[in-house]
Structures are given as C-alpha cells and as structure tokens.
Image (cartoon, rainbow, N blue to C red):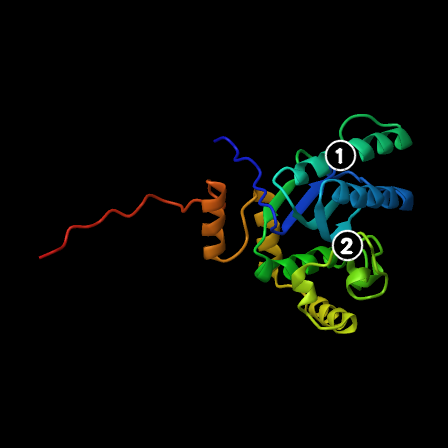
Amino acid sequence: MARLPRLVIPHHPHHVIQRGIDCQAIFRDEEDYSVFLNWLGEASRQFKLALHAYVLMPDHVHFLLTPSDAVGLGRMMQWIGRQYVPYFNRKYGRSGTLWQGRFRATVLEAESFAMLCSRYIELHPVRSGLVTEPEEYVWSSCQHHIGINPNPQIVDHATYWSLGNTPFQREAAYRALLEEGLTAAEIEGLTEGTLKGWALGPDRFKASLEKQAGRRVQPARRGRPVKNQPNSI
C-alpha cells in the first residue's frame, strides 16, 4: 500500500521527530548541540514556523511547532539537514546520511494536545534516565517555560499563555504540569500518532482536518462494514 503524503496543516501545532540512522548519536559534544540549536532557530524564522518546544536527545530530536503554510515544515527540516549533516561529517570524518529516513510528524488539536506534547518533549530526558528533573537538561525548552533561562527562539503557544496572567503564574503552572507527569497511555498515544502520521485530537477535529485536507488523517476502521440485516418477523 502506498504511503500517504505527510500531513501538514498550516496554523495548527505539529509534533516532529527526527532520528539518527541506526540509533547512532547525532550529537557528540556541546558544540554539536549548540550549532544545531542555532540552525534550528534560524530555520524556523526563515521558513516562518513558530517553535514552541524542543529537546535535542543524543540520537534524535523532538519539536513542537506551528507552520504558517503547507511547505515550510519540510523546507525547514531539509535546510537544517543541509547545514548540519556536512558539519557533522566533516568534524567526525564520516560520510553519508545522518538521519533514519524521513522525519515523522503529526498534527495536533491545540487545546487538548499542545501543552501535553510540550511536556512530553521536555520530560523525555527524564524518561530516558539522563537527568532526574527536566530543568537539569539544558538542551530542551524546559528552562524557558519555567522561567530559568528565557529563550528568544521560543514562541510561546497560546495555550501556554492561558496558564496565567503573569509570567510568574504561567511558569508556576507549567512547572506543576511537569511535576504531574504523563500517563503511559498519553506517552504511547503521542509516540505512535507521530510515528504513523495520524492527527491527534477529538473526533470533530479529525473530521474537520479530513475535510480540509481531502484525505484520511486517522487509521481506517478495521474489518468489513457491517451489512444491514433484514428485519426479523
């Protein structure tokens, strides 16, 4: 079965995952993280995407962002690859691609999933055992959201602004959400939805996207349609 083209819907948040080939490290020292992060900020501005959250893990990356058009996301990821992969290959004497196939992405319903996805991203270093508290990991947007280290590359999503009327209230509320954590079902749903490219949100949201995109945005129901049975007398 032919793979559906990647679903990109302007003005909706998207969760993006890009993995290193064969789970190999894509960052080996602090310079690598810093260089990549600078290019991420530059690319998001150049291709008009609002970057809401990110984490740079040793062998993969996660982004939460909102594109302003249907082509900017793909162009941003391509541009970053064209900058970072030659840099990495020159530095470490290697050749060839650095990525495990194409990047994965899914569209999110903002009210239900934007802050959930942001926490999913920023808690990833804790789930992976790299740190005990999310703010200890410097290569994520966590320190920005809880007020430790404001990052001009981050464009706070409207759902983050709704957490409070002042920066202190928003930062405290977001920290409380991080401390609340995520359920196993929430983690599995975000991971599977993104890797498979299925939209995440209420049924009405998915139905609206299908009408807008002219294609399926969720898995087809399994099994054959139920036939109408004749009335028994």
**SS category of the residue bearing label 1:** helix
Q: Name the amino acid type tagged 1.
A: Trp
- Tag 1 residue: 79
Q: How many marks?
A: 2
**In the image, what residue occupies the spot 81% across and 59% down?**
131
Q: Tag 2's secondary structure?
A: loop
Report x, y in % for residue 124.
Answer: 73, 55
Amino acid identity at mark 2: Ile
Percent from the top left, x then y, of residue 23?
74, 39
Q: Nearer the viewer, residue 159 or 98?
A: 159
Query: If you read the primary sequence from the N terminus, does the residue marked by circle 1 or circle 2 appear first?
Result: 1
Q: Is residue 218 visible?
A: no
In x, y percent, where is residue 9? 57, 45
Hey, which quadrant is residue 40 in on the image?
Answer: top right
Is 199 placed above or below 133 here?
above
Which residue matches tag 2?
154
